[in-house]
């Protein structure tokens, strides 16, 4: 009896293991794609309130979150390139300056002549965005309805501004044929986005524009005097674009999309950016929303002030502070580091800081320490851009471990003055006995992998800040 129970338990556990494996999110897998250059996925996207933006110091967006997961699936780094003109996106893709366009693109026959599309990510309808009557808040619903366009045929003779090179242009041309009358279609200036045009409808600068319904409905939360309930198209597919004849890459992306769309994670991400209208309104009214506010955190002025001590771009400094504390002045680590820049009490004392939870004192102390580290490396690492990486690494793990890694790099015939593919390699190896017991190593074991990741993430976020924050 016991034997049968044991066998049953083993079979049950085996089945449970197989079930758990099959239910695991596919984006956790690692897949190698040979034709990705420099072990990197280069994604072209737009800069708006739903695809890609910075909010309270954190890069966010529907396409951004998905493409991050895709890069992880391919086991490569991610580089995001911001382009606001759709035609330029296609030009960059076809000239080899990106691997895919991760953007809210409608699949059209005209575009299929230029690029291939992935499987659809979602479907939308194109809607007319129009302004409600002047005193709409005091009017009854049927009175408002009488003054709005509900039949697309009523657009005959009307002027509609649309985003340049968008799918809306062709849709309105086709609609003109369908209703047997001319619609005056005006292509907006190249730099204007659909969101910009919706804002112009709200302000009265223009009367009409066209938008995807999910985007229009989001914006109606903020611009309460706009209406976006008149459909001008049937359902249309939204997808990402890849170069023509990149069959292996396209197939791999499609495989990932199939598995990703079946997860709860995908539904949560979509809801976060297209359904949660309260969060959208909160973002776009914040001074720390990159599209409108232009700030990163409420400590920007202090970061700018003390960045001058070390001579850094304040956006690099902000990326460091975000990495350390996510701008929370009350953060305390397991090791005892405190505040915005996670200073250790002994370090703070060394630089005359008495209250680590005081934001200005903490930032002042952090930048005094960064200045000390910069001066420490200035003689040996003469290139100021390269030196930043050594300063960041030293801030995280201490200069002694970085000196050890440089010694190992030199011993194994690498370049001790270069971080990437040189010193960072040997810092990671300092977790192995062969290397931390080497005679050139004075500080012993180090969890170098964490520091390498730390430097990489700060620099990547800095590049994102440079693209999105003036």
Image: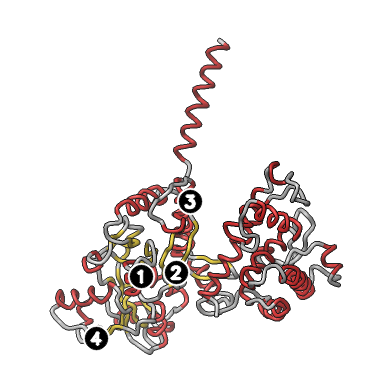
40, above or below 28, in the image: below
Q: x and y percent of residue 461 in the render? A: 57, 67
Residue bearing the label numbered 2: 81
Callout 3: SS: loop
Between circles 3 and 4, the one closer to the viewer is 3
Callout 4: SS: loop
Q: In terms of depth relative to the viewer, which is nearer, 402 or 239?
A: 402
| Inter-mark Cα distance, 2 to 1 | 10 Å
Find residue 125 and report its image quarter: bottom left
Residue bearing the label numbered 1: 92
| Inter-mark Cα distance, 3 to 4 | 51 Å
Between circles 1 and 4, the one closer to the viewer is 1
Mark 2 closeness class: few <14, some 14–19, many ≥20 residues within 10 Å: some
| Inter-mark Cα distance, 1 to 4 | 35 Å
Residue 75 - label: 3
The residue located at (75%, 50%) in the rendering is 441
The residue located at (29%, 81%) in the rendering is 146
Mark 1 closeness class: few <14, some 14–19, many ≥20 residues within 10 Å: some
Q: How is the image coloured?
A: secondary structure
* Quadrant occupied by the N terminus: top right
Asked whether, in this view, residue 140 is left or right of residue 283, the answer is: left
């Amino acid at each position: 009896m016991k034997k049968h129970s044991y066998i049953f338990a083993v079979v049950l556990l085996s089945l449970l293991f197989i079930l758990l494996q099959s239910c695991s999110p596919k984006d956790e897998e690692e897949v190698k794609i040979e034709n990705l250059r420099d072990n990197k996925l280069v994604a072209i996207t737009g800069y708006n309130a739903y695809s890609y933006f910075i909010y309270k110091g954190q890069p966010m967006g529907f396409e951004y979150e998905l493409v991050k997961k895709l890069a992880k699936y391919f086991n490569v780094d991610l580089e995001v390139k911001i382009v606001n003109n759709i035609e330029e996106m296609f030009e960059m893709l076809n000239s080899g300056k990106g691997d895919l366009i991760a953007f809210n693109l409608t699949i059209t026959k005209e575009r299929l002549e230029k690029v291939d599309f992935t499987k659809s990510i979602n479907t939308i309808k194109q809607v007319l965005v129009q302004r409600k009557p002047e005193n709409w808040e005091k009017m009854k619903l049927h009175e408002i309805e009488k003054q709005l366009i509900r039949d697309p045929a009523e657009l005959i003779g009307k002027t509609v501004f649309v985003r340049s090179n968008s799918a809306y242009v062709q849709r309105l041309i086709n609609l003109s044929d369908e209703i047997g009358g001319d619609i005056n279609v005006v292509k907006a200036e190249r730099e204007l986005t659909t969101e910009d045009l919706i804002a112009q409808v709200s302000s009265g600068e223009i009367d009409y524009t066209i938008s995807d319904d999910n985007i229009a409905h989001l914006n109606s939360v903020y611009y309460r005097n706009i209406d976006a309930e008149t459909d001008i198209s049937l359902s249309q597919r939204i997808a990402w674009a890849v170069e023509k004849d990149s069959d292996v890459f396209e197939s791999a992306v499609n495989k990932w999309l199939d598995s990703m769309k079946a997860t709860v994670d995908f539904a949560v991400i979509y809801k976060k950016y297209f359904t949660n209208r309260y969060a959208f309104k909160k973002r776009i009214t914040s001074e720390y929303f990159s599209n409108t506010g232009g700030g990163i955190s409420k400590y920007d002025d202090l970061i700018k002030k003390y960045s001058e001590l070390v001579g850094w771009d304040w956006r690099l400094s902000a990326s460091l502070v975000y990495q350390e504390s996510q701008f929370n002045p009350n953060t305390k680590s397991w090791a005892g580091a405190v505040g915005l820049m996670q200073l250790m009490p002994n370090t703070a004392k060394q630089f005359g800081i008495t209250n680590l939870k005081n934001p200005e004192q903490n930032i002042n102390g952090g930048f005094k320490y960064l200045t000390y580290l910069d001066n420490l490396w200035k003689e040996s690492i003469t290139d100021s851009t390269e030196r930043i990486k050594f300063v960041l690494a030293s801030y995280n793990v201490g200069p002694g471990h970085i000196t050890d890694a440089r010694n190992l790099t030199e011993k194994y015939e690498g370049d001790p003055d270069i971080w990437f593919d040189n010193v960072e390699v040997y810092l990671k190896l300092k977790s192995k006995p062969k290397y931390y017991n080497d005679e050139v190593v004075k500080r012993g074991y180090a969890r170098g992998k964490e520091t390498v990741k730390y430097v990489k993430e700060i620099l990547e976020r800095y590049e994102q800040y440079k693209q999105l924050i003036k």
